[in-house]
Amino acid sequence: MDILFLEPVFKERIWGGKKLNTRFGYDLPYEKTGECWAISAHPNGSSIIKNGRFKGRTLRDVYEKDRELFNHLASPRFPLLTKILDANDDLSVQVHPSDDYALTYEKDLGKTECWVVLEAEPGAKIIYGHNARTKEELRQMIESHRYNELLIEKEVKAGDFIYVPSGTIHALGKGLLILETQQSSDTTYRVYDYDRLDDQGKPRDLHIQKSIEVSTVPFVDVTPEPKILNYKASVITRYVSNEFFTVERWSVKDELTLKSNHFKLISVIDGVGTLNGEKLTKGDHLIITGEVYELQLKGSLELIVSWT
């Protein structure tokens, strides 16, 4: 019975900081570390398995060669990617394509994603959606730099859940630490970047035409209502369940026993405890394979759990 503990991959970002070290204790390779690819089999950064018979192999390699661990999933690519993002500065305003568009033009999956806010400084905001009524109006507002009129800002706090389907114009604001569950894609189109310059003094590339093509117009917030399940002292909150992923928060108090017949991605965002006798602490990321049929959780734990 396999539980795969994973070594994250870290990404330098112009907007990154040091919270991935101060909050989770990770050794960071960059001064501005923006992203922890916690559970990833993407070609641009695959997690390394830290334990057991697969120790030292990449998750991508194990998925390709040992598909029985993943319920013989038909997808040629591992479908999900879990990240923790440290927005020490505002991220660019961006939008992601659907599967059809991304596979046609980028040879990548589309990118529907969702966020659980782990920390938010007072007044921290996201950009979530836009006010254009037609594609032509969207184009006109972008080309005339009427971003204050175009973009919708929303204040957020720790514990909030935000669903970001492909086609949604969005951005994280400064002062946010979030856990992101997404399709395994690295395709992003920048709409606006606050006229910032990179380390070479040049503005970062924008992708205006592609952004307009893939954006959903008009914007509609389709975030589902969470479903709450109580298990004695423990609580499971189901945030979303659709064709792309199911994402839940498991708040474990004392003991929680669950049946499982499908592989699951788990990130420990707080607390300490055990899973089937294996110690769990804040900052651990793991996969329960499809060969694990019962989960026995003990302790005080906050987990983000996803599967497809």
Image (cartoon, grey):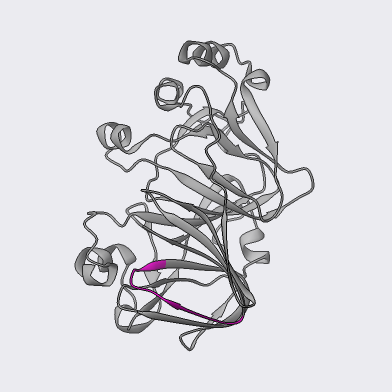
At 38% from the left and 69% from the top, the residue drawn is 48
| 292 sits to left or right of 5 | left
Judge whether residue 230 can be spotted in this image.
Answer: yes
Q: Is residue 91 visible?
A: no
Please state the horizontal and vertical placement of residue 299, each as a whole percent of the image: 61, 83
Q: Which residue extends farthest bottom?
A: 277
Q: Is residue 205 magenta?
A: no
Magenta: predominant secondary structure element? strand
Where on the picture, by quarter, is residue 56?
Answer: bottom left
Q: Residue at x 47, y 65 (%)?
A: 8
For the record, the magenta segment spans 254-264
Residue 44 or residue 133, whichever sits in front: 133
Is residue 256 in the magenta section?
Answer: yes
The residue located at (51%, 67%) in the rendering is 267
x then y, percent, for residue 179: 56, 56
Q: How many marks?
A: 0
**Residue at horizontal 76 percent and vertical 50 percent from the top:** 121
Q: Is residue 8 above or below residue 288?
A: above
Whether residue 17 sits left or right of residue 202 in the image: it is right
In the rendering, at what x and y percent does residue 187 appear? Answer: 39, 39
In the image, residue 160 lies at what x, y percent?
65, 51
| Residue 236 falls in image quadrant | bottom right
Quadrant where the C terminus is found in the figure:
bottom left
- In depth, the one of 100 and 236 nearer the eye is 236
Quadrant where the N terminus sits is bottom left
